Image (cartoon, rainbow, N blue to C red):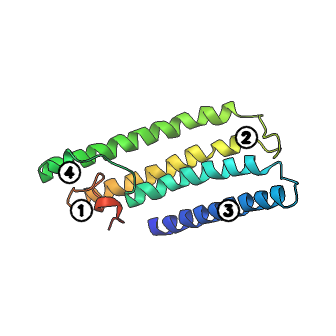
Amino acid sequence: MLKLLDRAVAALIGLIAAALLVTAFGQVIARYVFNRPFTWVLELDVVLLVWLTMLSGYVGVRRNLHMAVDFVVAKWPPGARRAAALGSLLLSAGFTGVLLWASFPVIDAMEGMEFVALGAAQNWMYWSLPAGAGLMLVAFAAELWRRARGSDAGGGAPHGGAPHGGTPP
């Protein structure tokens, strides 16, 4: 089930990235070839980039790609490294939970505000916050479940996944 979610999120990220590429390239052509730039491209690209960023956070958690400074922890014995990795995982999940909780007042605050050129409500951009945070919490829960089942990858990586940004088992 999680692999299906991974594929769906990756596909959505790919579509958003492709849309960003098309709109940015189209804007360059419209501006410099036809001297008639689109008024809506900047607003749309900002929205797409925010969604891309939040969805990519899920991929980063699932694949353990987020940056970690572990030069001190790397010298600790395996048990202490596992404890530090679990603490890091729990703190990261806690922060993500706060992000999820705090995103709803932001969405409410943007209610009724529209993008000037797009004419669309601005709060739909901010729905990326709970969507991304919710997905990241799913990824953190999956990692905690993997650890609870005893399939820890040795505790050498920050969240116990594959070391140096590889894909966890």
**Which corner quadrant of the image does residue 8 belong to?**
bottom right
How many C-alpha atoms fall within 10 Å of the one at disc 4: few (<14), some, or many (≥20)?
A: many
Could you tell me how far apart the alpha carbons at marks 3 and 4 are, in whole angstroms? 41 Å
The residue under the point 69% across, 62% down is 19
**Image marks 2 and 4: residues in contact by CB distance under 8 Å:** no
The quarter of the picture where the C terminus appears is: bottom left
The image position of residue 7, as x and y in percent, is: 52, 68
The three-letter amino acid code for the residue at tag 3 is Leu
For disc 1, the marked residue is: 153
Q: What is the C-alpha distance between the residues marked 3 and 2?
A: 22 Å
Give the label, 3 or 2, closer to the camera. Answer: 3
Mark 2, Cα crowd under 10 Å, few <14 / some 14-19 / many 20+, is many
Q: Are marks 2 and 1 in contact (CB under 8 Å)?
A: no
For marks 1 and 3, the one nearer the N-term is: 3
Q: Of the residues shown, which amino acid type is indicated by label 4?
A: Arg
Q: Which residue is mark 4?
A: 82
Question: Mark 3 — residue?
Answer: 21
Q: Position of residue 117 (x, y in %)?
A: 83, 44
Residue 104 percent location from the top left of the image: 60, 36
Local secondary structure at mark 2: loop
Q: Is residue 84 above or below residue 145?
A: above
